[in-house]
Every structure is written in C-alpha cells, then in structure tokens.
Image (cartoon, helix red, strand yellow):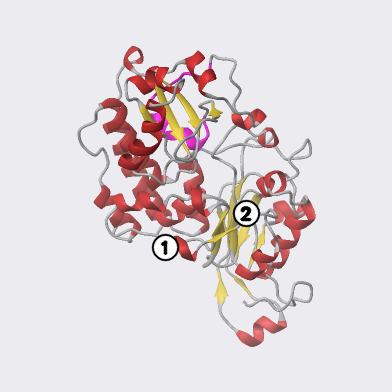
Amino acid sequence: MANDGHSGRESTRREYLQYGGAVVAGGLLAGCTGGGGSETTESETETTTAATTESTTEAETETTTETSESYSVSIEPMGEVTFDSVPETWVANNGSWADMGVALGLDAPMGVWLTGRYHTQYYDEIPGVSVDKSSIRQLWGDSGVGKEQFYDMDADVHIADPNFLKNRGQWSDADVEEISTQVGPFFGNSIFSRGYAWHDDYRYYDLYEAFEKLAQVFQREDRFEAFEQVHDEFQANLASVVPGQGERPSAAVVWGGGDEPEEFYPYIIDEGTSFKHLNDLKVNDALAATDVKDFFSNRGAVDFETLLDVDPEVILLRGQEAKDREEFQNTVISFMENHEVASELTAVKNDDVYRAGGLYQGPITNLVVTDRLAQTLYDADERLFDAQRVSDIVNGDL
C-alpha cells in the first residue's frame, strides 16, 4: 500500500479502512468541529460485525478472490468507523494510547505526539516487555504537526482525536479530511484531561472504556478481558492499602521540569486518565479549594511563594519522570531544600515531594505509577499487581 502521490493516488486507504455509513451520511467529520455543531448523543453505536463482503472493483477482482469480514467500532467524536481488515500499522496521539497498544501485544506505534512524554522506562518493571523509542517518530515539531509525515508513515489507522489536532496542532477540517481520505482514518478521544473547552460537547471515556475500544479495533478483545481481571485484582489490593479520609494527605499536583524548577504549572485533579492513579489512591487535592487556576484552563504558572500560601502536605511533581528516585533526590529535592522559599514548604521539610507520574497513562503504565505511589504515600510494602501476569498477557499467554 505504498503512497503513489498525494493527489493522484488511485487506490486510497479509504478503500481499506473507512468510516462507516453513519459518519458518511453526516459528512466526513460530523462531530469533529469542536463547536456547537458536534454530535453529542449519549449512547453510541455498539460494535457491529457486518456480513462477509466480496471486493467489487474490477482492479480488486483481478488481484484477489478472497473475501473479508468487515467490522465497525464506534467512538466519539468520529462516530462509527468501519474496518475491512484488521489494521497492521498505526499512529498514536500520545503515550496513553501507545501503552494500550503495547498491552494488546502490538508493535509500537509509528509515531506519537511527543516521544519524551511516552515513558517507556516503566516497562522495565514488566519482565519480557520493552519498547524501543528510537523507532517512534515525534509528530510535534518546531513548526507544529506537519501533514507530510502522515503520508510518509502511511499508517493504516491514526489513534488520535482529530479535535486535538485542530485545537493543539492548528489543523483545519480540510487537513483532517485529507489525511483521513488519502492515508487512513482517525479513531480516538482526548481522554487524559477534562480541562479542554473544545471537548465539552462530546463524551469522554475512562481508561478501560478507551482500552476496550482499541481492543475492538485490533480485534484483541481477549487481551483486554485479561487485563480487566488484572485491574480488578489490583483495585482490590489497593483497597486494603488506602487509608481513610482523615488519614490521606492533601497534595498539590504541579508540573516543573529540569533540575532546579522555580515555575510550576498547576493541575486540579479531575476525572481525566492522567489522574487515574491519584483518584484510585483517593489523594486529596490541595489546590481544588484555592484561587489557583488549573493549567488547562488558563495556561498560567505559579511560583514557590504561591505554593507556600497553599502549603500542601505533599507536592507531586510532573515533568520529572525521566529521573529515577535517586536522581530526583540529588537534583530537584536538593535544590528545594536549599532554596530560600521552597525550604519553608511543609512538603519539603518533611521530605514529601515526589514524582507525580506521567501525563499519559495506559493500562500498564497506570499499574506501575499507581503501585509506586502507593508505596510512597501509604507505605505499601509489596507490589500490588502481578507483573509476570501482565507480561504473559502482552505476549499472548492468556
């Protein structure tokens, strides 16, 4: 399925993987405008399996006599997307979806938005599972997200919310339509945060709802079901570790990169998947009842003086996942302990400043960061999930 040219391509990906009739009937990008025109139906079409169909074009008849069974999967904002065959190559918007693919035993995606925020070192905790990030293209660059690279990758499916591309990548409806038609369809939802105004008029999915959708796309529902069991067991184990309301700490979640951060982007804990580990651990939000605004709503920053006004019991610092605990202690913590203002923070005095976990979490990475924080915050003295079982599922030993 090589690309024979951007405009003169006679056989497009749309003949291999295409949007279903529900979307075609309403226009290619019905529900993808990000404004009042988006579809907001509460119920979505269930995954359906269509009858076996034979190829109908003369060219296809000459090259094959095989039949294929098409199937459809529905997700907002795209609606129903129909696949004539199981996709083999794919692009992921971010590390959440990339990790879901790894959990399903897929090869790594061809590209992600920011490779630096796909923290593949978490797989070191899982025997027999690893991802070579050097083979993954970073979609975001100095000039934004160029369309040409999508032609270069020529992926069967793009697991990305087109509204994210339009609102964060400055794409137009025409750009999305072009890549959908000439390369492959979009299938995704910006599940990691509930703070984007452009996502107000169509539904979100929790992590395992989204994971199930992806499993349906790649026809690997058995692995999803196995992961559900692991997740259920993990939640049961967490319940025995998480203390009561009055004993749980109040934490401020902020983003601060580098070895000596002095400016921080504040996050209010919401239902987005980037906070799943904190919600599962029932962490109290120290910023929720203050005047500090969530970064997603106003893109603003705070300094140590503002944090001192709040003075949270715990500081959970994002942007530090590339460091292990020792590196984090020797750089960031050491800097804060010797900083005139930061050293006055209760969290710094009590050595309660920790790495917060990545912004993008999938089923594997969520297990790892939740388990890590359970040990940190609640002194859990043993691993709360079966890492070997996770490895078995990824490798198809169900």
Q: CA distance from mark 2 to mark 1?
A: 19 Å
Query: Who is closer to the viewer here, 198 or 355?
Result: 355
Q: Is-magenta flag for residue 279?
A: yes
Instruction: Give the quarter of the figure containing the C terminus.
Output: bottom left
x, y (%) of residue 194? 59, 32
Indicate whether 310 appears above or below 103. above
x, y (%) of residue 209? 49, 42
Q: Which numbered disc covers residue 132?
A: 1
Residue drawn at x 62%, y 32% as measured from the top left: 296
Indicate whether 41 appears above or below 132. above
In magenta, the rendered stretch is: 271-288
x, y (%) of residue 12? 70, 71
In the rendered picture of this protein, how many numbered marks are placed on residues?
2
> In screen coordinates, is 329 left or right of 168?
left
What is the three-letter code of the residue carrying label 1? Asp
x, y (%) of residue 98? 48, 53
Q: Which residue is mark 2?
A: 140
Q: Secondary structure at mark 2?
A: loop
Residue drawn at x 57%, y 25% as measured from the top left: 302
Indicate whether 353 appears above or below 131. above
Query: Who is closer to the viewer here, 178 or 40?
Result: 178
Q: Which numbered disc covers residue 295?
A: none
Residue drawn at x 57%, y 47% as measured from the top left: 46
What is the three-letter code of the residue carrying label 2? Trp
Query: Residue 241, can we see it?
Result: no
- Residues at discs 2 and 1 in contact (Cβ within 8 Å): no
> In screen coordinates, is 106 left or right of 148?
left
Q: How crowded is the residue under tag 1: few (<14 C-alpha within 10 Å), some, or many (20+)?
A: few
Query: Who is closer to the viewer here, 296 or 222?
Result: 296
Query: Who is closer to the viewer here, 122 or 53?
Result: 122
The earlier-in-sequence mark between 2 and 1 is 1
Instruction: Give the quarter of the figure containing the N terminus.
Output: bottom right
